[in-house]
Image (cartoon, grey):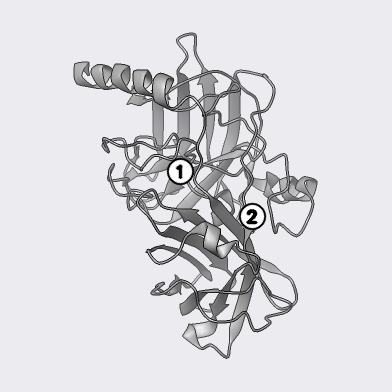
Amino acid sequence: MHKIGLVIVALVASVGIAQAAPTPPPQAVGVLRTADGTAIGNVIVTDAPDGGVFVSGAVKGVPQGDHGITVREAGDCAPFADAGDPVVNGLPPVTVDADGIGEFEAKANDVRVATLLDSNGSSVIVTAFGDEAQKVACAVLARVPVPAPLPAGPTSLSANFFTPAGATAGSITLTEQADGTVRIQAQASGLTPGEHAMHFHQFGQCAPTFAASGEHVNPLNTTHGLEDPTGPHAGDLPNITIGADGTGTFDGTTDLVTISPSDTTIRDTDGTVVHIHALPDDGVTDPGGRANGRLLCAIVQPITVALPDAGTSAQTWVLLSMFAAAAVAGGTVLRRVAQR
């Protein structure tokens, strides 16, 4: 515990001196739609700190099996137009399970977000079983704007956890304390025994797939991991432990984010989600700690502005996502994590 305390002092000092302004990485987002316009997934492309991009997302309602993911040189899906040649090489397929849900995450070293968002734009196409002649869905990529903090508000946030099917599976409460840390009290159910990663994610929505929440909250553009000397992300948290009965609780504090207006607030215009993942976070691997699938979603701060390519109004996005939201409130400043 003494060693952790020393790390906290050093980190707070460096943040206060060298990282006073947010420097979020360039990022693009798209909604994957079928030929008739039905939203069946999301895709996020983020500049990696060491070059290249992270490409991640999810699909739902797709036949079981492996399906191709390609990023094309033209931003055109009208509908499933010839979007040109691939501009990102070597992306693995998305594996869809028996429930029709598949998630994907990969690193591509031969492109940057600025290249994808040139005057011609770019699109992401899902092909059935990797067959180029069978296009399942398409998303036009658009730039993600830098979010703005919301005005000062309440000092606590609460929400329910939900499964992808919309079933309630626990709750979470965030409370800003007098010392500037945020206390996190969470309960989860219906999970496999063992440790599961828990993170703050950047967009306050869970539809049409959990990938709609984007990546970890990371406004200072650091690398992932509470054990990473060049990290962590502001959204990184310790793992939650689930017992033999499938339930578990977490009670800890973080000083990596704030609820009140700041460079690292979770109460901002693009909202915030807390996810519980399928596997534990290993604490070091960028960008997600090898935590794998997103099992539960809680919207602690709903999105208040429309994201690019949402295809609908901000108000509608909130309504679509409210199946995963309970109550909302607000708070202050923070910067590392401890579990009680």
Would you name the residue on which mark 2 appears? Answer: 207
- Quadrant where the N terminus is found in the figure: top left
Q: Is residue 10 visible?
A: yes
Q: Position of residue 119 (x, y in %)?
A: 65, 65
Indicate the quadrant where residue 75 lies: bottom right
The residue closer to the viewer here, 256 or 72, is 72
Looking at this view, name the residue that lies furthest to the top. Answer: 178
Determine whether 119 is above or below 324 in the image.
below
- Disc sitting over residue 189 in the figure: 1
SS class of the residue under badge 1?
Answer: loop
Amino acid type of disc 1? Answer: Ser
Quick check: 82 left or right of 284?
right
Name the residue at 43% across, 75% down. Answer: 93
SS class of the residue under badge 2?
Answer: loop
The residue closer to the viewer here, 160 or 299, is 299
Determine whether 11 is above or below 129 in the image.
above
